[in-house]
Amino acid sequence: MADRALPQIPQPATRCGFVALIGAPNVGKSTLINALVGAKISIVTPKVQTTRTLIRGIACDGQAQLIFVDTPGIFAPRRRLDRAMVGAAWGGAQDADIVALLIDSSRGLQEDDETILRGLGDLRTDEKALVLNKVDLVAKPQLLELTQALNARAAFAATFMISALSGDGVADFGKWLAGQVPAGPWLYPADQISDAPLRHLAAEITREKLYLRLHQELPYQSTVETEIWKEQKNGSVRIEQTIYVERESQRKIVLGKNGQTIKAIGAAARADIAVAIEQPVHLFLFVKVREGWGDDPERYRQMGLDFPQK
């Protein structure tokens, strides 16, 4: 009697897609993407516009792989760097399979939100979601009124009410996204959570600690670059980073009296980088003045931004 072939059990089809989180500055995009991914891949500070480039976080939900694009906040740009970041945000939304508009419900509808709502119609994708953040800070009647007003302004496929900080509602949002992204093969390994190079992630963590410590005193024009990344024989890594500021007075602020400020920033950054890369870290920070870096095309290229000509 000939062997009979066993029937093939169909495997669930995989899904994969890009999700762009857009919104005004400081509405909680970076906090939300970290919650969705389950790890810190984007920095969070009280200072507006801390996300400068498109940071991709990757999460897997069942058979779906979600690739999140944490865009810079969209606002009325005044400087060259502002224009580059806003351009990057709209560019990331234009290329996404799903666009999620994040609104800080505790602030209500602001001018920057109005600008974004007007631009939604120019995006290629019809798959848009409305995400109201910080709903735990708003009374229900006001929340419902805001939801109705926003849905009257744009065609959203779904509305979610969440608290990115506490995690309430985040899982439901993720489940919905998993069901909406198109069928297709995964683009990244299952255990990868970001496509940002480790050198970039380390620099972003240090920039976060810099702003958390000095956001009142330090102007926006400062950046961090990882100059040296050296794997050591004992399994640790030596990282040398330079904090660039535009004036000598700013360099003194970052250093602090007897170097105490830079030491505190370094200690906090070292601890977070070690957790992120799962290795012991020896971090060395330097502060240098780089006048006019906001008008240097090379600096924009290193941040992954197009250099606006005007």
Image (cartoon, rainbow, N blue to C red):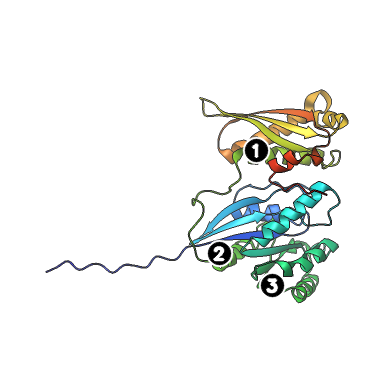
Residue 283: image x %, image y %? Answer: 65, 29
| Upstream in sequence: badge 1 or badge 3 | 3
Checking the image for residue 54, the label placed there is none
Q: Quadrant of the N terminus?
A: bottom left
How much space separates mark 2 and mark 1, taking CA atoms?
Answer: 29 Å
Q: Residue at x 76, y 66 (%)?
A: 119
Question: Which residue is at 77% across, 72% downward?
Answer: 150
Residue 243 figure quarter: top right
Q: Where is 290 relative to 2, above or below?
A: above
The residue lying furthest to the front in this view is 309
Q: Would residue 119 be visible to someone looking at this image? A: yes
- Residue 170 image position (x, y, % from top left): 63, 61
**Alpha-carbon neighbours of circle 1 within 10 Å: few (<14), some, or many (≥20)?**
many
Choose top left, top right, bottom left or bottom right for residue 142: bottom right
Query: Tag on residue 156?
Result: 3
Name the residue located 72 percent from the left edge and 36 percent from the top edge. Answer: 224
Label 1: which residue? 202
Tell me which residue sits at (80%, 48%) in the image: 309
On the image, the x and y values in percent for residue 12 come to 43, 66
Looking at the rendered structure, the secondary structure element under dot 2 is: helix
**Where is residue 254 drawn, in percent x and y?**
81, 32
What's under tag 2, amino acid-wise?
Answer: Ala
Rate crowding at label 3 as few (under 14), some (14 to 19) or many (20 or more) other CA atoms within 10 Å. some
**Mark 2 Cα-neighbour bin, 10 Å: few <14, some 14–19, many ≥20:** many
Count of numbered marks: 3
User: Label 1 vs label 3: CA separation?
Assistant: 36 Å
Q: Is 13 located above or below residue 276 in the figure? A: below
Q: Earlier in the sequence, mark 2 or mark 1?
A: 2
